[in-house]
Amino acid sequence: MKTIKQLATLILILTLSSSFKLQKQESISLTVQVSDLRNANGYVQFALYNKENSIPDKNYEKYFKKQKAEIIDKSSSVTFENLPAGKYAVGVFHDENKNGKIDKGFIKPLEGIGYSNYESIGLSNKPKYSKANFELVENKTINIKVIYLSK
């Protein structure tokens, strides 16, 4: 009988410890900041990605999580909370006219866009998940440069 109680206690301890471990893994937060926007019109949309081939995401259909934030002093930020550890990439766009989509001219976006790990975007430096991703294992803050390809 003593062995059964010890075994039950051990199972309970293991179950609780794995539950606490899962809760800890899901408690990571990522803060994303942008600054030096060309104006304070509209809002900034932040999209978090966690899968290969998810960016570019022209119609915002492949994201893991998405948030919008207001612009204050040509800057904006959001915090994604309760994330599991893993690889992520972030895409942002400055939606100046608040229509929820990236407006384009002939080829180039008319509004500002940016991705994690990108300082410039062009024909030889197109956005892709393999370059934009980073490892998230603890709370982190990143800054993303918003790039305006059209004036």
Image (spheres, helix red, strand yellow):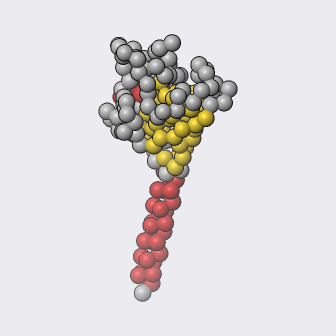
In this rendering, the answer to whether 113 lies above or below 43 is above
In this rendering, the answer to whether 150 lies above or below 113 is above
Residue displayed at 36% across by 20% down: 126
Residue displayed at 51% across by 12% down: 151
Q: Which corner quadrant of the image does residue 131 belong to? A: top left
Residue 136: image x %, image y %? 48, 39
User: Camera-side residue: 47 or 116?
Assistant: 47
The quarter in which the N terminus is drawn is: bottom left
In this rendering, the answer to whether 149 lies above or below 55 is above
Residue displayed at 44% across by 31% down: 101
Residue displayed at 44% across by 67% down: 15
Q: Is residue 33 left or right of residue 52?
A: right
The answer to whether residue 30 is visible is no
Q: Which corner quadrant of the image does residue 58 belong to? A: top left
User: Camera-side residue: 48 or 25?
Assistant: 48
Residue 12: image x %, image y %? 46, 72
Q: Residue furthest left?
A: 53
Q: How many numbered tags mark residues here?
A: 0
In this rendering, the answer to whether 145 lies above or below 91 is above
Q: Is residue 151 left or right of residue 40?
A: left
Residue 130: image x %, image y %? 36, 28
Q: Is residue 136 left or right of residue 40?
A: left
